[in-house]
Image (cartoon, coloured by chain):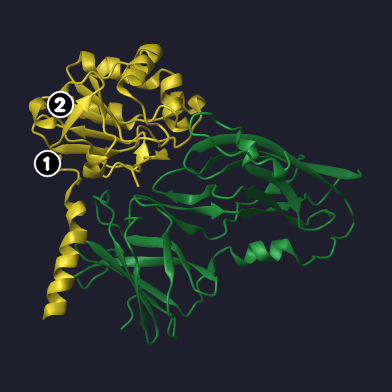
Chain colours: A yellow, B green
Amino acid sequence: MKRLKRILVLTLLLALPLLAVRVGETAPEFTGTDSNGKTHKLSDYRGKVVVLEWHNQGCPYTKKHYESGNMQSLQKEWTAKGVVWLSVISSAPGAQGYVTAAAENDYLKRMNAAPTAVLLDPDGNIGHLYAAKTTPHMYIVDPSGALVYNGAIDDHPSTDAGDIPSSKNYVSAALREVTAGKKVTEAATRPYGCSVKYKE
Amino acid sequence: MGIASFATPQARTDPPSTNVIQVTLVAERESIAPGHESWVGIRFQLAKGWHIYWINPGDSGDPPRVQWRLPPGFKAGPLQWPHPERLVTKYAVDYGYADEVMLLAPIRAPAKLAARNQVEFAATVKWVVCREVCLPGKTEVALSLPVTPRAASQPAGSFEDARKRVPERAPARWRARALAEQNEFVLAIEAGEPITSAVFFPLQPRQIENTAEQTASAQPRGIELRLRKSEQLLRPIARLQGVLVLPSGKSYLIDAPVTVAGNTTPTEQKSRKKS
């Protein structure tokens, strides 16, 4: 009986992270600080569509989408339509891709990037909450706060910017549907990229 | 490009990817004959700590890509991928290769070969190699072989070792079935004899949670593996396909029809039901 109880507790513990990020369920609430020191809560944006983009400026998969200007044009297009775009950096201090707020602001300027904000998540709290696996790894939250997309930016898992023109951009497709009040057709795909450099 | 020149990777400077990986094209036989098939291998040698990826790379990364450039009439068959290993970090599990791996491909020569001394096989190979950082890379590899009227004898050696790691079709007497429970797949392999332990590598991403521990239990006539379903699996699947690696290093292709727990009929009609 005692053993059974222990197994039950263990199972529950193991099962907990499972409940976090299923498409169709409520997206986990978080509070994060951006590169300008401003606090953002996911629930602040209830009523709006929110994009979460896991980011690492040194990762070749992320570079593919920034050096080509692909990510910036998505950011501009969709924020202009009222979508909130939060880039999240979960690299730990000392790990590859970790940046200070000042360095990130320089990068944003240099790259002409246009997210609503960049959340600095050096402890990996937001990353673990969403089980973000790669950079990039993209999530979309609908106006009711439900997670409606979890996965890759597009269907070409490569580091080659030459693949972008022939790629199907899953995020664009999902945003077109969710902003039109439709159900997202392709709601989960395999994210591709570098692993997120979490604190060990 | 010597192996001795491996650079220590720094977080902020990208070392050229060729310092941590060496790619070569090798042939199994010393010559090629008209109408015959000859095996070639793309060998990746990796510096310590670095890895490349399998067809299903797991939680991150991307498998290498090979684009052949062969003389007219020569045809390359599909790449044969040795079974991968689980590359485990705290928050991610990748499926790939460390140290050294050789991808194999058969190349068939045309039945009629114009008289010439040598043929050249070449390929563009692209990869992503990762340690704490990931580095994309690309190289051109080539080899030339003399054309002989008869095929050269097949030597033993590195190709045999590589071939041993390529998954085989499961023996005809084996039966594989998967039961879909709420959070897990229970993959049952009936082999006619007990299998003490095994690791399953799914061919398709987004079916099982890569980081979840696989619980294997030996059965009198096979083995049962409990595999946690992927968070990203939103629809039921008809088949669970992958590679089963045994402690001996032997590996088999598994294609298991999936039955939903509580349902007596498999989700796919064709699947064989064994009582």
Q: Quadrant where the N terminus of chain B lies?
A: top right
**Residue depicted at x 27% and y 51%:** B233
Q: Which residue is mark 2?
A: A40
Q: Which residue is mark 1?
A: A26
Amino acid type of disc 1?
Thr
Q: Is residue A86 above or below residue B62?
A: above
Give the structural element (helix, strand or loop) at label 2: strand
Above or below B160: residue A157: above
Q: CA distance from mark 2 to mark 1?
A: 17 Å
Residue in front for this viewpoint, B264 or A179: A179
Left or right of residue B243, residue B220 in this image:
left
* Residue A167 image offset from top left, x and y in percent: 42, 29
Percent x, y for residue B9?
55, 37
Dot 2, crowdedness within 10 Å: few (<14), some or many (≥20)? some
Q: Quadrant of residue A126?
A: top left
Front one among A17 and B272: A17
Q: Earlier in the sequence, mark 2 or mark 1?
A: 1
Callout 1: 10 Å neighbours few (<14), some, many (20+)? some
Position of residue B183 relative to residue A96, above or below, is below
Disc 2: which chain? A
Please say if B86 is above or below A62.
below
Work out whether residue A176 can be spotted. Answer: no
User: Residue at point 47% right, 80% down?
Assistant: B173
Label 2–label 1 contact, CB within 8 A:
no
Which quarter of the image is occupied by the C terminus of chain B? Answer: bottom left
Q: Is label 1 in a helix, a strand or a loop?
A: loop
